[in-house]
Image: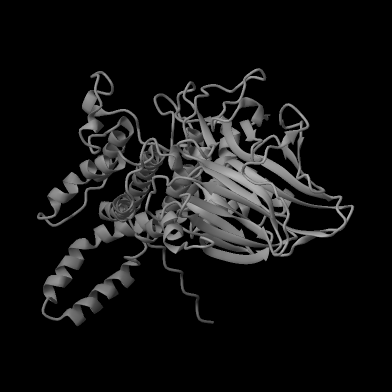
Amino acid sequence: MDIRRVILATVLSALVLIGFEYFMPEEHKTSSAIQGKTTAITAPPTENDQPRVTDREEAPSRLPIDAVDVVGSVNLRGARLDDLVLRGYHETVRPDSPLVRVLEARNEKEPTYVEFGWYGSPGQTIKLPDAHTLWTTSAPKLGSDAPVVLTWDNGGGLTFEIDLAVDRDYMFTVTQKVRNTTGAAVSLVPFSRVVRGYTPVETGGMLVHEGPISVIDGKLGEESYKSLRDGSTAPNFVSWSKAGTGGWAGITDKYWLAAVVPDQKEEVGGTYGFDTPAGAYQVGFTGQKPLVAAPNAEIQTTSHVFAGAKEVRLLERYQHEMNIPDFWKAVDFGWFAFLTRPVFFVLDWLYQFFGNFGLALLTFTLIVKAVFFPLASKGFRSAAAMRDIAPRMKELRERYKDDPVQMNQQVMQLYKKEGVNPASGCLPLLIQAPVFWCLYKVLYVTIEMRHAPFVGWIHDLSAPDPTNIFNLFGLLPFDPTLVSSWLLLGAWPILYGITIWLMQRINPATVDPAQKPVFIMMPFIFTFFMARQPVGLVIYYCWNNLLTMAQQYTIMKLHARKKNEPEIIPPAKPRGKKG
C-alpha cells in the first residue's frame, strides 16, 4: 500500500478526533458527570457498617440499604431514595479510592435523588404524604433478599404504603398502595421522578449524551441541561412533555444512570423540567388516569427505579426480562449503533474468553485484518502495480501535457492494459474507517472499558497512557501536564510513532520535494496527537500497523517474485493433417 494512502487514512481519522477535541471542552477530572461523586466510603461496607446521614437528618429517620451491589439509605422523611453508592466501582483505578456515588441527598453538595408519591384529583381536599412526612418501616434495613414496607396514616381514613425491594444489581421495585377506610371514593394520580439539584460540568459535545433522557412510545428523547433551564417557565416549570404507554426516563451521566420506570401497561405522561426557585432538574412520569379507591378498598401501582452503572448486558437483561423498551439506549452508542453495538459485543465476548480487554483488543484487530484481507491484498497489489507503471504514466503526462483529454484517454488505456484499478488501494481504508470510529466510541462510552487493565503500567484502557517522557517516565518528581496539557507523551504513543516511521521506511512514498518535510514530520505529529487519546485505541493502532507491515512485506515479496519470473509461452499445438 502506498504510504500516502496510509497517511491519508490517518489524517482523516485524526480530523474526526480533532473535531471532537476542539468542540468538546476537556472533562473536569472531578466532575461527577464523568467520575461519579466522592463519598467518604473507601471500601465495600460490611454488615456492621452504618449508612452515613447525608442530609443532616436524625439517624432514626433513615432506613439503611445493604444490598449485593449497592449500599446507602432511604430517607424516611419524605420516603426519598437519596443515598446510594456502588460497591463495585471506585473513583479511580486505586482500590482504596472512594466508591462512586450515584444518589445524594438534597442538602448535600451534588444532590441527585428519586421521589415517588401521589397527586390528588382537582376538588379533593386530602392530606397526602409530602417531603416532610415521616414514614415508619417494617424492618431495620433494606437488602437484596429483605424487602421492607413503609407506612403512613394520614389520620383521615387513608393509609399509604410503599413496598420497597432491591435486586442483586441496581433495580428497585416500588409498589405504592393506598387503603381507603372512609365512606367516599378517593381519586389519586401516581408520580415518580428523578431530581438533580445542581448542574454538572457539561462536555458540550456530541460524542456522549449527558442529562435528561427517556424512551416513550419507542422514541428516544435527549435534552441538555441548558434546554431545560431555558424552556421551563412558571407555574409548572415543564420544558418538554410526551404522553405514552410505559417507557422509562431519567438523568444520565457518562457511565451512571438514575431512571424511573413506570408500569409498562399504564398510560403516563413523561416530563422534563427545571424548577427555577429550587434550582433543580426534574425528569419523571405522572399517571394519565386517576386511580379510584372505593370505600373500604385499596389501589396500588408498581414502578421501578434504576440507579447504578450502565452495564450493557445488564441493561439488555432488564430490557428483556422486564419489557423495558430500548433500555440499552441509556448507553450512547450514537447514530451508528447498528455498527457500534456489534463491535462492543465482539470485544466483550473476547474479554469473557481471555479475561483481559487488552488481549481482546489485539484479537479483535486480528479478526478485522482477516475479514478485510482479500480487499487489503488487492489494494497492496494495485499499489505495487501503480508504482511499476509510474514512469510510463509520467511519460504520457509529459507527452500529452497540452492535450488533457488525450492524456486521460491514454492513462485509462494504460490502466486497462495493465489491469490496474487506482481506486482499489483506497477501498480497504475507506471500509475500515467505520470500524475505527466504532472502536473509538466503544472505548469512550462503555463502562466495561472503564478501568480495564492491560499489562504493565496500563491500568485503564479508556484513559491516556499515564507515563510521560517529559518526566523520564516518572523518574523526575513532577507532573509536566500541570504546565500544559500537551506535555503528555507516554510510552505507547511513542511506540505508535515508531510504527508510522517504520511504515514509511518499508514503503517510501514518491512525493513532491516540497511536501517531503511534511511526511517526515507525520510520525511526530501523530505521536503527540495520539498521546491524548484512550490508550486502548493507541494499542489498537500500534498492533494494526505491525500487522499491516507484515502483510505488506509479504505481498510485496510475492509481487516482486512474480514480476521477475520469466514469462512461460506454452508450445503451439500441432496442426492436424488434412485428410
Q: Quadrant of residue 486?
A: top left
Towards the viewer: 210 or 138 = 138
Residue for point 17% across, 45% down: 520
Query: For this rendering, which residue is in front, 168 or 131?
Result: 131
Taking 135 as reference, is 126 above or below it?
below
Closer-to-camera residue (443/435): 443
Q: Is residue 566 above or below residue 123?
A: above
What colouring method underlies this structural image?
one colour
| Residue nearest the observer in this picture, 99 or 2 | 99
Asked whether residue 420 is in view, the answer is no
Q: Residue at x 76, y 31 (%)?
A: 145
Is 158 drawn above or below residue 461 in the view shown?
below
Q: Is residue 100 left or right of residue 383?
A: right
Numbered circles on residues, count: 0
Q: Position of residue 280 (x, y in %)?
A: 49, 49
Q: Is residue 521 visible?
A: yes
Q: Position of residue 479 (x, y in %)?
A: 25, 26
**Percent position (x, y) of residue 132?**
63, 41
| Residue at image location 63% in from the left, 50% down from the top | 260
Image quadrant assignment for residue 510? bottom left
- Give the side of residue 101 with respect to residue 427, left or right: right
